[in-house]
Image (cartoon, rainbow, N blue to C red):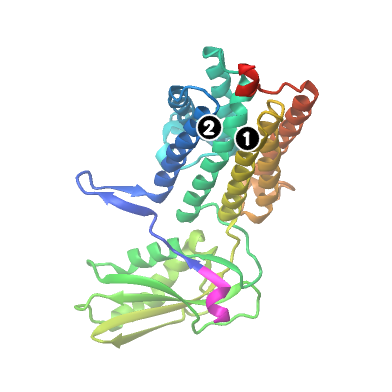
């Protein structure tokens, strides 16, 4: 029981489903990204309705937000994390499907978009809008980070304990590609806790890769030689595998074939590297920030000065992001020798802006008028 509850082997299919007509997969990350905007739009409509503002404005705001988030996050990744690569071939900036979005860039994009919104629609004050947008941005952020977890990306550092996550998705893909030579030989690949390898090092836990072959597949001596040579070479040749499962590069690959119920199986034994679920840490505190800001808006919006909730959001989000980065693997190679990684350096000014806005809001003391006060 203790072993079952100790760590999670995580290998979900990143595709939620496939559109039959177009034969195009819909990925969890894209789905949760879109859901973040859809749900946030409905929450913001409810907020605007309660504040006596037209819901139509939220539709316009949503367009601003979607464009600003995608463009800002993409430019942020390109300019903050790999400027030489993208500036040498700027057309690559448009290759969003290759991945690469930075939340700091998305935040800057949102601020610019909201400034442009209030410039065009002068009946809205910038900090009045920012206070309300902060609520739903926190919610959207939680869903996006959950999408990162479903995508098995932005993994955490080793926990050096038996508590955490073993990310096994890429290992599954590598094993499937390697063993499916000559057709659809493999019907399933599962991961189980336990196995023939053991380690005294904390945070290395025995795991088994269990491969089920199709009924017509007979295991030959050639298959065994393939596993001992080619499969071992493939498993040890990908950093995305070795970062998450240790197959003991200085030892022969530990495996066995066996037959059960007319089906041949292969078990390959490794040591799972238990890591922090840093994406879920961020998703969790985004949910808590969302609930806090929603409560403040509901109970205190006519008592708090405009801009205070936005400043609080910036301070909490980026301070917690700074801490969260201590549990994450670095995104780029150049970060390895840095005292603080790029995410932390970018979070510091964001958090300081939040503090400055809160202080400014308290000093200015401009509070929105309640509907009852306006009626009087």
Where is residue 113? Give x, y as percent: 54, 23
Q: What is the count of numbered marks? A: 2
Would residue 63 be found to the left or right of residue 223 on screen? right
Q: Secondary structure at mark 1?
A: helix
SS assignment for the magenta stretch, majority = helix
- Where's the N terminus, which quadrant? bottom right
* Residue to which mark 2 is pinned: 47
Magenta stretch: give its range.
Answer: 1-8
Question: CA separation, marks 1 and 2?
Answer: 9 Å
- Please tell me which of labels 1 and 2 falls first in the chain: 2
Residue 134 placement, left or right of 320: left
Left or right of 304? Residue 95 is left
Q: Which residue is at the front of the view, 331 or 59?
A: 59
Q: Position of residue 267 (x, y in %)?
A: 40, 80
Q: Residues within 10 Å of mark 1 (few under 14, many from 20)?
A: some
Residue 83 drawn in magenta: no
* Image vertical order of residue 326 relative to residue 264, above or below: above
- Nearest to the observer: residue 315 or residue 27: 315
The reply to whether dot 1 and dot 2 touch (C-beta < 8 Å) is yes
Q: Residue at x 54, y 42 (%)?
A: 139
Determine which of the numbered discs, if any, sits on residue 251 in the image: none
The residue nearer to you, when weighing 364 against 223, is 364
Is residue 29 in view from this perspective?
yes
Q: Which residue is mark 1?
A: 297
């Amino acid at each position: 029981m203790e072993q079952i509850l100790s760590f999670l082997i995580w290998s979900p299919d990143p595709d939620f489903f496939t559109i039959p007509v177009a034969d195009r997969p819909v990925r969890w990350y894209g789905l949760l990204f879109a859901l973040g905007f859809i749900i946030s739009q409905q929450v913001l409509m409810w907020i605007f309705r309660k504040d006596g503002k037209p819901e139509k404005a939220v539709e316009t705001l949503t367009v601003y937000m979607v464009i600003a988030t995608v463009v800002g996050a993409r430019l942020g990744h390109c300019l903050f994390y790999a400027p030489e690569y993208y500036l040498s071939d700027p057309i690559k900036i448009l290759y969003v499907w290759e991945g690469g979005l930075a939340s700091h860039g998305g935040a800057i994009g949102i601020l610019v978009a909201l400034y442009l919104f209030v410039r065009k629609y002068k009946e809205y004050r910038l900090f009045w809008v920012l206070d309300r947008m902060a609520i739903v941005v926190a919610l959207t952020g939680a869903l996006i980070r959950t999408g990162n977890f479903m995508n098995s990306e932005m993994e955490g550092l080793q926990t050096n304990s038996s508590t955490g996550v073993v990310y096994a998705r890429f290992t599954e893909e590598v094993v499937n590609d390697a063993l499916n030579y000559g057709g659809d030989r493999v019907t399933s690949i599962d991961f189980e806790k336990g196995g023939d390898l053991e380690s005294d090092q904390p945070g290395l836990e025995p795991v088994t890769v269990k491969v089920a072959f199709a009924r017509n597949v007979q295991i030959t001596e050639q298959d065994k030689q393939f596993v001992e040579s080619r499969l071992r070479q493939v498993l040890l040749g990908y950093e995305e595998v070795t970062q998450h499962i240790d197959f003991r590069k200085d030892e022969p690959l530990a495996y066995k074939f066996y037959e059960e119920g007319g089906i041949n199986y292969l078990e390959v034994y490794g040591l799972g590297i238990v890591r922090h679920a840093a994406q879920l840490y961020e998703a969790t505190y985004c949910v808590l920030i969302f609930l806090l800001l929603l409560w403040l808006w509901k109970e205190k919006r006519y008592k708090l000065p405009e801009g205070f909730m936005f400043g609080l959001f910036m301070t909490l989000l980026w301070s917690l992001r700074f801490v969260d980065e201590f549990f994450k693997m670095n995104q780029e190679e150049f970060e390895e020798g840095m005292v603080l990684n790029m995410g932390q350096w970018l979070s510091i000014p964001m958090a300081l802006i939040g503090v400055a806005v809160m202080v400014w809001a308290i000093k200015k003391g401009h509070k929105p008028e309640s509907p009852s006060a306006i009626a009087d």
